Amino acid sequence: MANNRIPNPSLLTSTAVESEKEYRKEIIEGQFMENIINKIESSALDGFRGMKMQIHRPENLKDFEIAMEELQKAGYFCEIKTETKKHFLFKSMTVTERNFIVRWD
């Protein structure tokens, strides 16, 4: 028989907390946040006071939520807006669209 030990809950909690910290740092200091900042700067240079990005994959929501928290700390207005719309070809179908919105006015 294999030695199946039940993990200690406090060990799992501390592991989860450390993993979350590392993940947040990776998002904030990595390419994901750099892309968002570049889009913000580009929008500002084009004369806009806000920026909108469509979230294509639901698994990216956590990354956008982390970015949103950091941008809010810096004074930006951010939100993730979810809209349900009718499909443009098949009117009986609906499509859920998620957008990451940043404003600085």
Image: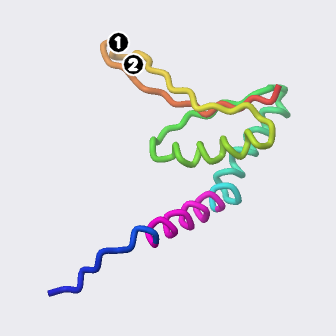
What is the x, y in percent for residue 11? Answer: 46, 72
Question: In percent of the image, x 79 and y 38: which residue is there?
Answer: 42
Q: Residue furthest left?
A: 1
Badge 1 density bin: few <14, some 14–19, many ≥20, Cα 10 Å: few
Residue ID for mark 1: 91
Q: Are marks 2 and 1 in contact (CB under 8 Å)?
A: yes
Mark 1: secondary structure: loop
Question: In percent of the image, x 62 and y 57: which residue is there?
Answer: 24
Mark 2: secondary structure: loop
Residue ID for mark 2: 87
The reply, left or right, for residue 69 in relation to residue 40 is left
Locate the C terminus by quadrant: top right
Q: CA distance from mark 2 to mark 1?
A: 5 Å
Count of residue discs: 2
Q: Residue furthest top?
A: 91
Q: Determine which quarter of the picture holds residue 103.
A: top right
The reply, left or right, for residue 40 in relation to residue 14 is right
Could you tell me the amino acid type at mark 2? His
User: Which stretch appears magenta?
Assistant: 11-25
